[in-house]
Amino acid sequence: MDLRGRVNRKQVREGGGGGADLHFDEMVGSYELNIYRHRNSKIRGLESLEQYLESQGCHTVYITDVPAPVGPGYDTIRVTCERGQTIPDVALRRAHNWAHRRNFLHMFRKPGASPSSL
């Protein structure tokens, strides 16, 4: 899914409105969560998030050398689990809330579904 042309920088800065809980139920059962951050934005709390996700059996991967679907200048923080297993709900909620608090764009993937963006 390509979001270029649909979301401009002003909309990204203003955020999507609402909280992370408004659409969390749509994410339950995801095997991948991609969080997009602009290279110029600061990241706070990433180390503690990574430690928590690791304690829940999840992996965090940084992708900087492939264009992000949200546009140029974005890096991807990908959260997954072993061998395509679904991300535990508590880990997914924590990572999702973390992304919302920092106003980062994010996308999730569920088995048998096309990627969804929020």
Image (spheres, rainbow, N blue to C red):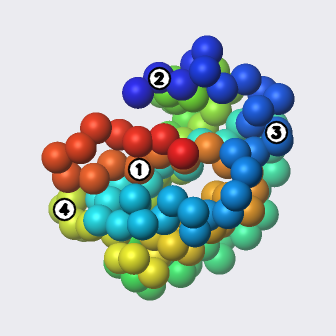
Q: Is residue 53 above or below residue 68?
A: below
* CB within 8 Å, label 1 to label 4: no
Numbered circle sitting on residue 2: 2
Q: Position of residue 9 (x, y in %)?
A: 78, 27
Task: Single out the residue that lies furthest toward the bottom.
Answer: 55
Q: Is residue 98 above or below residue 3?
A: below
Question: Which residue is the site of mark 1?
Answer: 108
Q: Position of residue 70 (x, y in %)?
A: 57, 28
**Is 39 left or right of 108, judged from the image as shown?**
right
Numbered circle sitting on residue 86: none
Element type at mark 1: strand
- Identified at 29% across, 65% down, the residue is 29
Question: Which residue is the site of mark 3?
Answer: 13
Q: In what quadrant of the picture does the N terminus appear?
A: top left
| Neighbourhood count class around disc 2 (C-alpha, 10 Å): few under 14, some 14–19, many 20 upward | few
- CA distance for labels 3 and 1: 21 Å
- Residue type of the residue flagged with mark 4: Arg
> Where is residue 40, by image quadrant?
top right
Q: Earlier in the sequence, mark 3 or mark 4?
A: 3
Q: Position of residue 27 (x, y in %)?
A: 40, 60
- Residue type of the residue flagged with mark 3: Arg
* CB within 8 Å, label 3 to label 1: no
Question: Which residue is the site of mark 4?
Answer: 83
- Identified at 64% across, 58% down, the residue is 99
Element type at mark 3: helix
